Image (tube, rainbow, N blue to C red):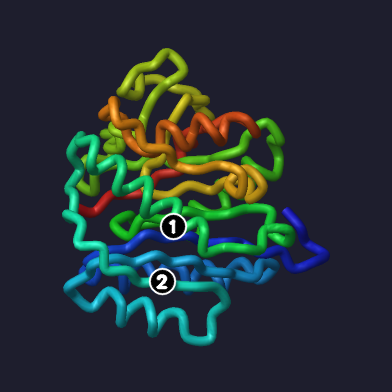
Amino acid sequence: MQTDNIDTLNVFMCLRNNGDTLVDTFRSLESIETHFTNYSFHYYIFENDSTDNTPELISNFMQNRSGVYKSETLHTPQWTSVKNVSRTSDMAYYRNAMKQLCNSWNDSSYSLIIDSNVSFSISTISDFINILHHDQSVAMATPFGYIHDSPNTYYDTYALKTTAGKRYIPRFIPSVLKVQSAFGGIAMIRSHALKHSIWEPDSHSLESEHVSFCKNISSFGCVVILKHTRVAWIP
């Protein structure tokens, strides 16, 4: 972690009809800004097709903050957590559009990607920064994301692929588990790795868009799940 100079922490989000949870998400980000004073926060938020107050909430949050937010009307379906080729293609488009909002990477060591329906805290971000700072072999750190009322159940199995190609987490795992792919609702990535990686839809596959993304990230280091870094998914 840099302590002598201000480092930029890029924060990326894709949003759509997230008014029910977005206030809590932004409140958590405000607490992180207050805690991590050695970072300058730049936000890159892509929103599409919302019919609730999501655009207004984004606009209010971005007042006096650095970064870019963009809204598009695409008339695409709002997908739930289902396996569908069209869903994967749409999500890859949203994620890439989100990333393209950032045109300055040189002053940023780490970037954060956040889904709006996960709860996270200062300790979540501290865990991510610590592993990336102390282990140069790690390019992307993800949490043990669980369903809000089932703390021992890893929920994001759609994006999960272990080193053995499995879609489930074994009961007993090390504190840092290397995987082929994972997300868990929030992830921190070395900014130079994110800059050179994209989400690639596969028209013949039902895999999550994160599988291709993590494959690209793996060119820069490993993807890991931090066993003791717990975040809750709020359906």
Q: How dense is the environment of label 1, judged by Cα within 10 Å: few (below 14), some, or many (20 and up)? A: some
The residue at which mark 1 appears reads as 97
Q: Could you say which is closer to the camera, residue 174 or residue 221?
A: 221
User: Which image quadrant is residue 53 in?
Assistant: bottom left
User: Which image quadrant is residue 193 in?
Assistant: top right
- Where does the image place residue 220, in percent across and percent down from the top left? 65, 34
Q: Give the residue at x 52% y 67%.
A: 32
On the question of residue 117 being in view, the answer is: yes
Answer whether labels 1 and 2 touch (C-beta < 8 Å): yes
Against 51, is 181 above or below? above
On the question of residue 123 being in view, the answer is: no
Q: Give the residue at x 29% y 26%.
A: 205
Against 191, is 16 above or below? below
224 with respect to 79 (left or right):
right
Q: Could you say which is closer to the camera, residue 149 or residue 1?
A: 1
Q: Give the residue at x 57% y 53%.
A: 126
90 with respect to 97 (left or right):
left
- Where does the image place residue 215, in percent across and percent down from the top left? 50, 29
170 with respect to 64 (left or right):
left
156 with respect to 222 (left or right):
left
Q: Secondary structure at mark 2?
A: strand
Against 195, is 69 above or below? below
Q: Secondary structure at mark 1?
A: helix
Against 54, is 104 above or below? above
Residue 70: mark in rendering? 2
- Where does the image place residue 146, in percent across and percent down from the top left? 30, 41
Q: Could you say which is closer to the camera, residue 87 or residue 229?
A: 87
- Where does the image place residue 4, in percent across and percent down from the top left? 82, 65
Which label's residue is closer to the chain start, 1 or 2?
2
Inspect the image, locate mark 2, and give the three-letter code of the amino acid beneath it: Lys
Residue 165: mark in rendering? none
User: Residue placed farthest to the right in the image?
Assistant: 4
